[in-house]
């Protein structure tokens, strides 16, 4: 299977129309690189239904849009649309057993499943850890809940609190102290997910897990902590999405 990749520097779309235009532009560039396309795989943060409808997405303008229909109408190509964390889970280098994935980026998400396949839930919304687990904030979240982990430990929260260039100032005292606090919050989440799912392995993806303060907090588990599981750091989210997309297409060939 041949894959194509296009990296295009474009401003973050603020409206639904801008977002769809950006998708169309990126897709046209990708299609120009290959002669034949079987399917397009699209990952999107938020609540994504099996038919490709984005029920709600806090950090993209695609809430209420059926992305599968968009690609079919615009390019006459079948599209497989999945939550981004579910797609990353499909790309994990895992074997048999129960696995949990915690993803960090603009928001915090995740997935869990058995034998390499993510649990989808009744509406395909399973794994929204950033909006089901609590952080140190008591503020209302855009999801409708209060005190979500996403409000304090996500990339969006760190940008708002420390400035968008915080990743270039890791030795700054304020940045280092805030990252230490985030590391402690994520360590508590790690323990909670371990006790909730009793996984064979807990996988963490996102560049924050490569930061010393955060990794130290995650690795500093008490000797008597339970259950015992292995934590692995998969920092390259895009590599997981690519592997997951290939696997998803292969599994869907007999369905579509």
Image (cartoon, rainbow, N blue to C red):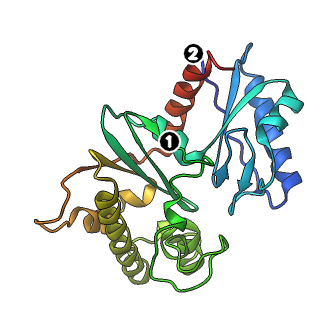
Is residue 238 visible in the rendered image? The answer is no
Q: Work out which quarter of the rendered image holds the N terminus and state it.
A: top right
206 or 185, which lies in front? Answer: 185
Helix, strand or loop status at disc 1: helix
Q: Position of residue 191 (x, y in %)?
A: 29, 64
The residue where tag 1 is placed is 88
The residue where tag 2 is placed is 1
Query: Compared to 122, does 220 lie above or below?
Result: below
Q: Position of residue 201 (x, y in %)?
A: 29, 46
Is residue 55 visible in the rendered image? The answer is yes
Q: Closer to the observer: label 2 or label 1?
A: 1
Query: Compared to 102, does 84 lie above or below?
Result: above
User: Badge 1: few (under 14), some or many (20 or more) residues near its Cα, within 10 Å?
Assistant: many
Q: Report, in whole angstroms, how far the alpha carbon at label 2 lies from the one at label 1.
A: 19 Å
- The residue at the point 41 percent across, 37 percent down is 92
Mark 2 and mark 1 in contact? Answer it, CB < 8 Å: no
């Amino acid at each position: 299977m041949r894959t194509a990749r296009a990296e295009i520097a474009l401003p973050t779309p603020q409206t639904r129309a801008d977002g769809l235009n950006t998708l169309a532009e990126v897709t046209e560039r990708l299609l120009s690189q290959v002669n034949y396309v079987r399917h397009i795989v699209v990952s999107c943060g938020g609540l994504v239904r099996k038919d490709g409808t984005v029920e709600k997405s806090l950090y993209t303008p695609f809430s209420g849009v059926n992305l599968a229909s968009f690609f079919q109408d615009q390019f006459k190509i079948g599209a497989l649309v999945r939550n981004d964390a579910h797609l990353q889970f499909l790309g994990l280098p895992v074997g048999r057993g129960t696995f949990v994935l915690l993803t960090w980026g603009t928001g915090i998400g995740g997935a869990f499943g058995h034998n390499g396949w993510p649990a989808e839930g009744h509406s395909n919304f399973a794994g929204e850890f950033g909006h089901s687990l609590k952080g140190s904030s008591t503020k209302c979240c855009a999801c409708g809940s209060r005190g979500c982990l996403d409000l304090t430990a996500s990339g969006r929260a760190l940008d708002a609190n420390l400035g968008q260039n915080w990743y270039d100032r890791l030795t700054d005292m304020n940045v280092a102290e805030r990252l230490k606090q985030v590391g402690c919050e994520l360590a508590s989440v790690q323990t909670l997910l371990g006790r909730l799912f009793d996984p064979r392995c807990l996988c963490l993806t996102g560049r924050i897990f490569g930061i010393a303060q955060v990794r130290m907090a995650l690795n500093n588990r008490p000797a008597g902590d339970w259950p015992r599981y292995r934590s692995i750091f998969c920092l390259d989210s895009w590599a997981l999405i690519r592997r997951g997309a290939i696997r998803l297409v292969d599994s869907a060939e007999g369905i579509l």
